[in-house]
Amino acid sequence: MLVVESRGLAKAYGRFHAIKDLSFTIEKNKITGLIGRNGAGKTTLLKVMAGFFQSTAGEIKVFSENPFNSLKVSSNTILVDDQMNMPQTLSLMEVLESAQNFYENWNMKIARGLLEYFSLHPGQFHSRLSKGMKSTFNVILGIAARCPLTIFDEPTAGMDAAVRKDFYRALLKDYLLHPRTMIISSHLLHEIQDLLEDILLIEKGVKLLHMPVSELKEYALVLRGRNETLMQLTENEELLHREAMGENHSYIVVRNQLSEAKIQKAKTEGIEIGPAAAEDVCIYLTARSKGGVDSVFNRS
C-alpha cells in the first residue's frame, strides 16, 4: 500500500522554484530518509506532504487524498520540526494531555516515560526550554502520537550526541512496537542510516535518487592509486568525485559499474578498491564540483 504518491510535484515562491518535477512513492510502514543539503527543498516538500503548503503544479496524494486542508491527512499525520508552536499557557504535561485528545493512537505511557527519562519537568513551559530541550520534547510528541504518517524534519537540532543516540533508539523501539510510515529529514545520514530502509536524495528541488539503503551502500566504488593508472581505468566511467592524495596519487569515486576485468586489472596494478560510504555518495552527488573544495585552491 502506498502512503505518499507524488507525480511531477512542483512548489514555487514567486520566481524561486523550491521543488521541481518530483515523482516518487513511499510505501506503508517503511522508514524513509529524506536527504539533501541545506536549501535542497526538504522542508518545503515535507510541508506540502503534511498539508501545510499547497503545491504549485503536479500532484501529490497522502492516504489517497490531496493533503492540503485535508482533515484525514491532518488527523493521521504529525510533522515534527523546530518551528512547532506550543500554547504559551500550557505546561509540558498539559500539552501532552491535549495531544492525547487529538491523536487516535496516542500512548501516554510512552510520553510520560520519555519525559522523565530526558529529565523534562512536567510543569515546565515549552517557551522557556533550551533549543536542545525543545527538540527533545518535540520528538517525544512525534513518537507518542504514533501517527500512521510520522514526519521528522531535522529533529535533533540542538541535541547533544548522547540525546541524539537515545532518540534514535527510542524511535526504533517504538516503531517495532507500533509500525508506521516514517520520514526523517536529515543531513546527518551516518547517524540515521541504520534506522532507514529507503533513501530519497534531492538537490535544488530535484530528485537525484530514491532507493533502498542497501543499494546505496553499493552505489559507488572508491579507488586509490597512481593518477595515470586511475585515469586509464576510469575512462568512460561515471565519475562522482576526485581528490588529490599527493603529487601523483588520487582518490577517485566512480559509479559501481566497473567490469570484473577492470577490477582485476586495477588490483594487479596496485589500486586499492572499496565501497564508498552511503553518506559520502550523497555528498558527492550533490557537490558543486567533482573535485570538492580542493578545486578552489587548485585554480588559485
Image (cartoon, rainbow, N blue to C red):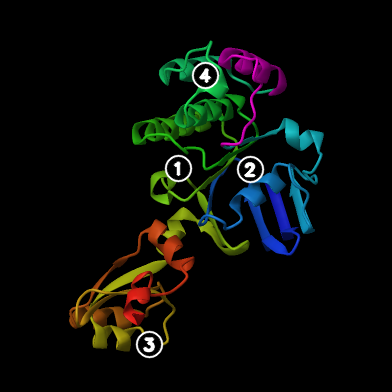
Report the amino acid beneath label 2: Lys
Residue highlighted by disc 3: 235
Amino acid on which disc 3 is placed:
Glu
Q: Give the range drawn in magenta.
A: 82-103
Checking the image for residue 45, the label placed there is none
Q: Is residue 242 above or below residue 8?
A: below
Left or right, residue 158 beside residue 10: left
Inspect the image, locate mark 1, and give the three-letter code of the amino acid beneath it: Leu
Residue 264 on the magenta segment: no
- Indicate which label's residue lies in the foreground, 2 or 1: 1
Q: Quadrant of the C terminus?
A: bottom left
Mark 1 touches mark 3? (CB < 8 Å): no
Image spot of residue 69 (x, y percent): 81, 39
Residue wearing tag 1: 195
Residue 8 as seen in the image, left or right of residue 272: right
Q: Mark 2, mark 4: which one is toward the viewer?
A: 4
